[in-house]
Amino acid sequence: MMAKPLPSTDKDLFSRDSVRNSRAVDDAIREMAPAVYLEREDIVMLGRYEHVSKGLVDWKSFSNTSRPWHDPNSVRPEILLTDDPPRHTQVRAVIGRALSPKAMKAMDDAFRREAEILVDDLLRNGDTEIDAVSGITARYVHKVLPDLMGLPEQGREKMTPFGNAVWATMGPMNDLFHEAMAGAGDSFEWVDKSCNRESIRPDSLGGEMYAAADRGEISEQDAKLLTLTILSAGSDTTVITMGNAINLFARFPEQYRILRDDPPLLRNAFDEALRWDAPSRMAGRIAQVDVPVDDYVIPAGTRCGLMFAAANRDPRRWDQPEKFDVRRDVRGHLGWGQGIHMCVGKALAQAEADALLGELVKRVKCIEPAGEPEPWMTTIGHGPIKVPVRLLAA
Ligand code: HEM
């Protein structure tokens, strides 16, 4: 049977307006058809859970080596997420060992201590009103992540403009891209210098990357690229996902109460927050062969967007997807990705969330909204960048 022509749209998914409403915009693409051609971008989007999940696992059909809008000279570290096996396998072994659940367990005490210090400070005068992103999650991640990496103390405020610019390189070069680049200032120089062997504390995660180079497992250049990668991939993702979790705790108070009554539910609640809204709208891939998707065929050579966030709300897969339910069986959600590129920093992000959100659950009896959340104005990254809340001390 002949494949049907791919449905197409001239809608701009990455305009300011679309970014502001990206939940609705992405869901509309998912509902339009299993595969939709974006005329402006010359890419094909897949938004249904079944196809996104299959596509993430099938790395032979969907390669990572040339993703949509790929610019090999961009400022983003070109390693791991831009590799296929066998290079991917070799590099992933090194970073995977350093970020393993066992290695992260050893960090628990440090993460908990920092969470206690932060929450003590937040609640020093009792109830408080604060932006949960800049005042809680970014403050926390921008302390514990560079500490873990062995980076110098000075200049860490540059992590925000650096993150904005790195995320911008994942998407089209529109006005949001240029704004992020213009806002980067000297953050790239700072990051580049801070991730050099001479700047890194040897007894740190960054130090481990260089030790792997000394053992000949990776090159010296790869050790630096991996250090840069952990810093860029591990920061905004965790800041936004924890910020979104706090936002949901405020907007679904009965779910927060369930969690306070049963704190071991926290891991599941964090995953459910990630299912409800992922910090990345899509994974970029390039089709290596003609890929059938229901009645359509994506031709070999097509750049594609596998839409994590839309798939995580696909009603074909999830019962009442808009509901935040801390007891939901959330296994199989795509917020961490799937297959060989599945998030290698998951254990680290979970350890941070266990410590920080765990401390809030223990010490804050109720979180109330104190204003509307503001969206992160970036094209591929996604989520609330400002979450005004009122914390009522327990
Ligand atoms: C809640 C926080 C996080 C979320 C939601 C998240 C999400 C993801 C997703 C969806 C992918 C797959 C991308 C794709 O297939 O195209 C991924 C990959 C990756 N993540 Fe995370 N991430 C988080 C935290 C972290 C942290 C803390 C680190 C580092 C310390 C990290 C490092 C990476 C790296 C290096 C990859 C590429 C892995 C590969 O290509 O094999 N992530 N992450």
Image (tube, rainbow, N blue to C red):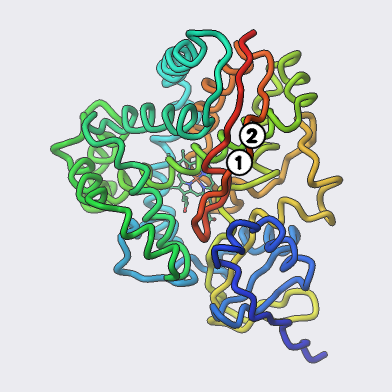
Asked which quadrant contains residue 350, the reply is: top right
Residue 196 position by quadrant: top left
In the rendered image, residue 323, in percent from the top left (x then y), is placed at 80, 40
- Is 48 on the left-hand or right-hand side of 194? right
> Residue 107 location, x and y as percent?
42, 21
Label 1 close to label 2 by CB (< 8 Å): yes
Question: Which quarter of the rendered picture does the N terminus lie within?
Answer: bottom right
* For residue 13, above or below residue 254: below
| Three-letter amino acid code of the residue under disc 2 | Asn
Instruction: Indicate which label's residue lies in the foreground, 1 or 2.
Output: 1
Is 381 rendered above or below residue 28? above
Identity, as a three-letter code, of the amino acid under mark 1:
Pro
The x and y percentages for residue 273 are: 67, 37
Find the distance from the CA under tag 1 to the CA under tag 2: 8 Å
Give above or below for 257 relative to 275: above
Residue 346, image x and y in percent?
Answer: 53, 38
40 to the left or right of 158: right
| Res 33 quadrant in image | bottom right
Q: Residue at x 50, y 54 (%)?
A: 377
Q: Is residue 66 in sight in this rendering? A: no
User: The residue tagged with tag 2: helix, strand or loop?
Assistant: helix
The 10 Å Cα crowd at callout 2, few under 14, some 14 to 19, many 20 or more, is many
> Which residue is drawn at the image coordinates 59% and 73% (left, top)?
12
Asked whether 255 or 329 is in front, the reply is 255
Q: Which residue is mark 1?
A: 373
Most foreground residue, 102 or 301:
301
The residue identified by callout 2 is 247
Residue 298 seen in the figure: yes
Per the image, label 1 sits on a secondary structure element best described as loop
Q: Residue furthest front?
A: 371
User: How many other residues sit within 10 Å of disc 1, few (<14), some (14-19) or many (≥20)?
Assistant: many
